[in-house]
Image: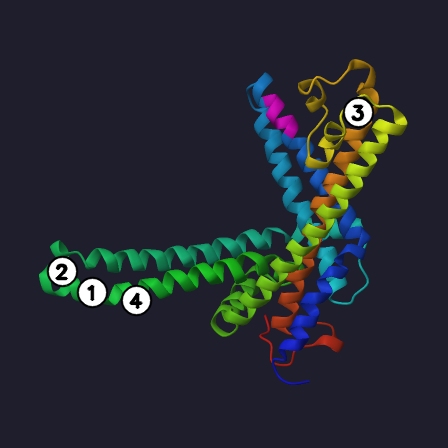
Amino acid sequence: MRERDPLRALSLVFGSVDAVRNTRALFVLLATFACAGLLVAMAETSLVTRPGWWGPMQAGAALFTAFYGGNAAGILVMDDARGRPVRDVADALRASLFTAHRLLLALAVLLAAYALAAGVLLGLLWLSRASVSGPVLGPLLFGVAVPVGVLTVGLAALSLAAVVMPLAAPAVWSGASAWQVVRGLARLIRERLLQVALLMALVSLLTAGMGALVTSIVMVGGRVIAELGVAVVGVDVPPKQLMAGLFGYGLRSLGAAGAPHGSTGHASAALVGGGVVFALALVLPGLVYLRGTCAVYLAMTGAAPPQAAHPGAVRFD
């Protein structure tokens, strides 16, 4: 295999569409989405009806569930991406509880480095003021600050969006410590920034494509079932209203739309079933994105399975 073979990296990224077959990760991500959404709804209700400490606690529980549940799903996706047997859900949750804090530590260090660079740039711009450096030195410093600032801000934004935010979590899921994550991502920014950015753009396209496919399936199937529900079952609610669950609307939308009282049972059942489909429509593209970030991480760090190893990759050890 050629060193830094881009075709191998592309094959790993394109393989991210297989994430939909990882039923354990799908279950964990779906359960996380449902539990976090339920806790958010409870927090909103508590903040309106019972102002106090109960609403913020429920909101904190929603964040806790989303963070650790999402990391557990990522751990299961990483197992699959590395060609290893996918561990049990309980083991993934346990690993998430013990390791997910590394992600917060690594992001805190990296964001502090970005803040330090921003402070240096602001200091250079401040020194460029004529009232500080004089009418001659000030313009000269500003002439230096313009190209330096443009390149610094542009590269910082690209590295933050293409390397730091998407790849920090896969590094933790693979078992790297917080310091190893910081060092490894810094090396990727120095040596593989453009390659990682292009691969992440491909992951975004695959995720968008999966989202478009799922949306088309849901829309076509939902429209047909809604029409049949009116024609065959006899539900006296317009088909568009029966499809409300496919767009994330809950049972309250029935009363707001003036649904007849006699048909509320069937319409409520349609909304509940549509809500399940809506959750799946959100989870499947998210699962593809998680697998894609894991694939980019494996391709660029040499942590891929032996049959897909990347000899010229940067390592985190």
Q: Position of residue 151 (x, y in %)?
A: 36, 66
Q: Pointer 4 and pointer 1: residues touching (CB < 8 Å)?
A: no
Instruction: Indicate the amino acid at tag 1.
Output: Leu
Can the viewer see residue 144 in this picture? yes
Distance CA(mark 3)–CA(mark 1): 68 Å
Name which of mark 2 and mark 3 comes first in the sequence.
2
**Helix, strand or loop under label 4:** helix
Q: Tag on residue 141? A: 1
Residue topped by disc 2: 133
Task: Between label 1 and label 2, give the one nearer the viewer.
Answer: 1
Chief SS of the magenta region = helix
Which numbered disc covers residue 104? Answer: none
Question: Where does label 3 land, which residue?
Answer: 267
* Numbered disc in front, either 4 or 1: 4
Residue 170 occupies quadrant: bottom right
Disc 2 marks a residue whose amino acid type is: Ser
